[in-house]
Image (tube, grey):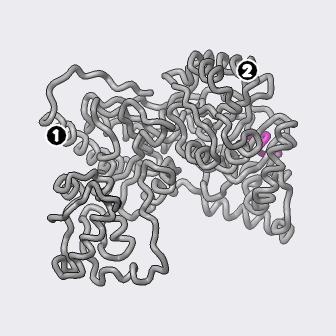
Amino acid sequence: MQLQIERRGQRPLYLQVVEQIQERIRSGALPSGSRLPPIRQLADELGLTRLTVHNAYAELQADGWIESFVGRGSYVAERPGVKAQMRPSPVLPPVPLLQPGALGEIMRLAQQPQMISFAQAAAAPETFPAREFGRMVQHVLAADGVSLFDYGLTQGDTVLREQLSLYLLDRSVQFAPDHLLVVAGAQQGIDIVLRALVNGGDTVLVEGPTYLGMIERMQMQGLKLVAVPIDEQGIRPDALETAITLHQPKLLYTIPTFHNPTGVSMSAQRQELLLDIARRHALPILEDDIYGPLAYDGPAPPPLKARDADGLVIYLTSFSKVFMPGLRLGVVAAAPPLLEALVAVKRFSDMHSPQLTQRALAEYLARGHFTAHLRHVRTLYRERRDAMVASLKHHFPSDASWRVPGGGFCLWVGLPPGLRSPDLYLEAIQRGVAFAPGQMFFPEQPAHGFMRLSFAAHAPEEIEQGIAVLGELLNEQLKRRQRFSTPAFRHAVPMV
């Protein structure tokens, strides 16, 4: 397709592609049902990035000019441009994956039919005990009736907090019910802590890499992010000391157990060093432990909170990964003075979490059902983790690297030297497979290429199918790179 691209003009490149394809459709040069060139082909022909062409196709599809099908390509629509005529006002261009909004893009991709999405770290829907939980709902409705639909306590249902206090003992976290705050999942827990402890312009330390949702949330709040490197034992104490001295942070956010995205768990020695540094600098720590219960090769390491003798650690966990994300229930444990501030923020946020689901979860925990549920999902997810590791060994290039995580949902893959994930991402989407490009998990551009692959939501045969596609694409990229580059000394890609 011969299009004229004006590179020095002020018109965005992707809009130039959109407008010229629209004109060809209007003129009849591209009649209904015509197949458009694949993204990679058109990008190569025009000398554009694949992300530019991808955004152009997304805009055309949003306006109804074309229709795109996973694995089949893009075609001129039967009634092109109908949606555009119905629009009341222009719509902003689609948000690129590697910009703010990436988390929403990952969740959207996970919902596309026939897409094998390793992008979202999500629990397997077939593990959700909907019928059993429904019986808990019926039981508490019969017992408490309309009172469950009245206003409740901001801090959380008393019965649920009693059960959560017992539940946390399995993670060696000892807190009385009065020191717990029920939140709408880990996302709200993070939001409440940030609003209570930091202001716009303040510095927050995170691990490099770290959870994408935390990066997006802090950027929206106008906070300064400083990434502290991690290794196979967790956050590096020397780098942490340096970051504290240089940036005077107000908070450290860490995922010490089955870290997202790398899967690393912080060693006991590293935990002690971290707590000692935090104590000397009076630095509060937000510990995200949502994957702690999902250990596959023996007991999970105790959380930081289990070693915290000074009340510096704010402990956060959730039932989104271990149970059902749609419940939107989690818990924050904090020392009393800070807890009061967190409860105040929660009150202004949404008053309280729904009483019906809180009481039903309390009943589910009290009857011992959750213990059996955990045993089941640990076995299932261990099988899926092992299936993904086996598939990676079979299909990925020999100079790709990864570490087998002891728990959680994610495998962190270092790409062969010289390869980056954005172009691979777009090609993979075209072939019906999604993953999370590694650079999304860094506040700044990383020196090496990575991808995060989440295995929990897919059966072993789907994992094999998806990894085979990614392996084929990686090998194709390596062959193209070898054709256009001279041999050079190859460095191993560090895992973190």
Point out residue 144 in the picture as x, y percentages from the top left corner. 85, 66
Main SS category, magenta section: helix
Which residue occupies the foreground of this view, 84 or 377? 84
| Residue drawn where x is 74% and y is 35% of the image | 314
Residue carrying label 1: 480
Point out residue 54 in the picture as x, y percentages from the top left corner. 32, 58
Camera sees residue 171: no
Magenta stretch in the rendered image? 162-167
Give above or below for 183 relative to 61.
Answer: above
Whether residue 164 appears in magenta in the rendering, the answer is yes
Quarter the N terminus occupies: bottom left
Which residue occupies the foreground of this view, 142 or 59? 59
Which residue occupies the foreground of this view, 322 or 141? 322
| Residue drawn where x is 35% and y is 65% of the image | 58
Query: How dense is the environment of label 2, judged by Cα within 10 Å: few (below 14), some, or many (20 and up)?
Result: some
Which badge, 2 or 1, comes first in the chain's sequence?
A: 2
Camera sees residue 192: yes
| Residue drawn where x is 27% and y is 32% of the image | 418
Q: Is residue 377 left or right of residue 286?
A: left
Q: Which secondary structure lies at badge 2? A: helix
Whether residue 450 appears in magenta in the rendering, the answer is no
Image quadrant in which you'd find residue 83: bottom left
Q: Is residue 280 left or right of residue 25?
A: right
Q: Which secondary structure lies at badge 1? A: helix
Residue carrying label 2: 281
Quarter the C terminus occupies: top left
Mark on residue 312? none
Kind of residue sitting beneath label 2: His
Image quadrant in which you'd find residue 490: top left
